[in-house]
Amino acid sequence: MPYFVYKVSPNLQLTYLDTKERYQEARTLVRELRAQASPDEPGEFRLIFAHQQGEAEKLLSTPRDERVIGED
């Protein structure tokens, strides 16, 4: 399965950037994009592992539950 690289804007607008077959290539691309990005530029760069582009977009646009550390 391929790795899809996206830019995710604060309003969850997804911008497709590239597809890589190997994790190392996708990780390197995302790190380069993050290093080149302006601190004033909103959004973040993400990579996602999925069967196809539609599945990747669905996974990225689904809100994640807050991570709970420890017990209350």
Image: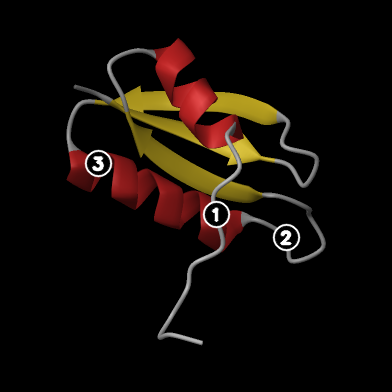
Tell which circle, 3 or 2, labels the residue nearer the N-terminal end: 3
Q: Disc 3 marks which amino acid?
A: Glu
Please provide percent x and percent y for residue 35.
53, 62
Count of numbered labels shown in the rendering: 3
For the residue carrying disc 1, how many other residues have a C-alpha within 10 Å: few (<14), some (14-19), or many (20+)?
few
Q: Which mark is residue 12?
A: none
Secondary structure at numbered mark 3: helix
Please provide percent x and percent y for residue 16.
56, 24
Task: Determine the image quadrant of residue 18.
Answer: top left
Q: Disc 2 marks which amino acid?
A: Ser
Q: Which residue is mark 3?
A: 25
Task: Determine the image quadrant of residue 66.
Answer: bottom right
Secondary structure at numbered mark 1: loop
**Front in this rendered view, residue 46 or 17:** 46
Please provide percent x and percent y for residue 34.
54, 57
Q: Which residue is mark 2?
A: 38
Q: Which residue is mark 1?
A: 65
Write the residue at 57% across / 34% down.
62
Please provide percent x and percent y for residue 2.
25, 24
Q: Is residue 13 above or below residue 63?
A: above
Secondary structure at numbered mark 2: loop
Q: Is residue 18 above or below residue 52?
A: below
Q: Disc 1 marks which amino acid?
A: Asp
Q: Nearer the viewer, mark 3 or mark 1?
A: 1
